Image: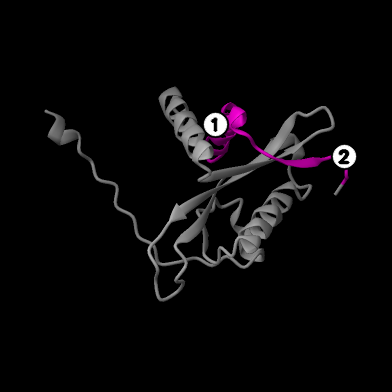
Amino acid sequence: MSEIYTTRMAAVEDADIIAQQRRAMFEDMGMTVADESVTLFNAWVRGKMTKGDYLGWFITLPDGDVIAGAGLWLIEWPPTPMDVATTRGYILNMFVHPDYRHQGLARRLMDTILAYCAEQRIRVILLHASSKGRPLYESLGFKATNEMRLIQNYDHMLT
């Protein structure tokens, strides 16, 4: 990969960029993203970054333009038989601008995040993978789990 790219940590002031990359990530997966969800996420990520619970990394061009990014949400978790540590890492908001894909930038971001987790002794790292991202994550050792999900519809309770 060319060394014209720089990796840097995101600051709270970068929350707008993170929110816009998140929107683009979901749109790439074929989802419609409401402006309200972007606004609410922006407030959420600012709060988490201020408390140190969300860390972000960007890849930039020499002029400082951000072309890729990813985040790590540090989640308080109860000790389990798998890991007695009380912090888990959740990787989210992986996005590479379409003009810069297939150059190893997502892997570079993942390597950076995984190195940070190793330094902090965070053993359990979670993420949800799109079909496009799954091969990268599997190549890094991530395995599918038996997680289940229920999304309840409370609309009927509003009447």
Q: Position of residue 110 (x, y in %)?
A: 67, 54
The magenta stretch spans residue 61: no
The magenta stretch spans residue 8: yes
**At numbered mark 2, what does the secondary structure look like: helix, strand or loop?**
loop
Residue 132 visible in the snapshot = yes
**Could you say which is closer to the camera, residue 138 or residue 41?**
41
Q: Which residues are magenta?
A: 2-29
Would you say the magenta stretch is mainly helix, strand or loop? Answer: helix
Q: Quadrant of residue 64?
A: top right
Q: Amino acid at mark 1?
A: Ala
User: Badge 2 is on which residue?
Assistant: 4
Mark 1 is surrounded, within 10 Å at the Cα level, by few (under 14), some (14 to 19) or many (20 or more) other residues, namely many
Q: Position of residue 23 (x, y in %)?
A: 53, 32
**Could you say which is closer to the camera, residue 92 or residue 55?**
55
Residue 94 visible in the snapshot = no
User: Looking at the picture, does residue 101 appear above or below residue 13?
Assistant: below
Direction from residue 78 to residue 153 in the image, left or right: left
Mark 2 is surrounded, within 10 Å at the Cα level, by few (under 14), some (14 to 19) or many (20 or more) other residues, namely few
Q: Residue at x 85, y 49 (%)?
A: 1
The circle on residue 154 is: none
User: Looking at the picture, does residue 93 appear above or below residue 17?
Assistant: below
**At numbered mark 1, what does the secondary structure look like: helix, strand or loop?**
helix
Q: Position of residue 32 (x, y in %)?
A: 46, 31
Q: Residue at x 60, y 27 (%)?
A: 13
What whole-number distance in Å separates the C-alpha atoms at marks 1 and 2?
A: 25 Å
Locate the C terminus by quadrant.
top left
Q: Position of residue 134 (x, y in %)?
A: 59, 57
User: Badge 1 is on which residue?
Assistant: 19
Task: For the residues labelled 1 and 2, say whether their Cβ atoms are less than 8 Å apart.
Answer: no
User: Looking at the picture, does residue 10 appear above or below residue 82?
Assistant: above
Tell which circle, 1 or 2, labels the residue nearer the N-terminal end: 2
